[in-house]
Amino acid sequence: MSAFQLDAGYNRRGLHISAQYQFHWEPFRNKRWMVCSGGGIFSGEWDDELSAGLMATAGLEYVMRDLPLNFGLDWRPLLNLYRNRGIDLLDLGLNIRYRFGM
């Protein structure tokens, strides 16, 4: 399964928005736990300056059985390519996703 994701987030560098393409699979033979990986682009604040760059994503998600919700933990390393160049390897995120179609 794959997904396209748009999100807004806040980390120690500042506020950012991102667009990502992710692949999901079920490694535990359990339809409730999924692993995801992918990548995309981001733009936003990086130490009080406008920035843009690339991001990768790796995460673990739990799919609710009777509700169209997913809960997850993501690791999102960022590579800033515009203006204040740099790498942020410690960007983590907790998420709640609404799932269209059960």
Image: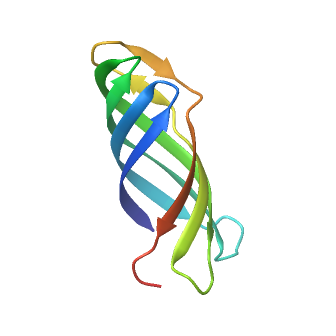
User: Relative to 13, is 6 above or below?
Assistant: below
Residue 15: percent from left, percent from top: 39, 34
Colour approach in the figure: rainbow
Q: Residue furthest top?
A: 84
Position of 14 relative to 83 (above/below): below
- How far across and down, in percent of the image, does residue 3 sit? 39, 62
Q: Is residue 49 left or right of residue 98?
A: left
Left or right of residue 65, residue 1 in this image: left
Q: Nearer the viewer, residue 48 or 67?
A: 48
In this rendered view, identify the residue nearer to me: 81 or 70: 70
Residue 81 at x, y = what percent? Answer: 32, 19
Front-most of 68 and 41?
68
Residue occupying the point 36% across, 48% down: 20
Q: Is residue 50 left or right of residue 75?
A: left
Task: Name the image quarter holding the N terminus.
Answer: bottom left
| Count of picture labels | 0
Q: Is residue 94 left or right of residue 45?
A: right
Q: Position of residue 66 (x, y in %)?
A: 60, 87
Q: Residue at x 60, y 63 (%)?
A: 71
Q: Residue at x 46, y 24 (%)?
A: 13
In the figure, 17 relative to 1: above or below? above
Q: Nearer the viewer, residue 96 or 80?
A: 96
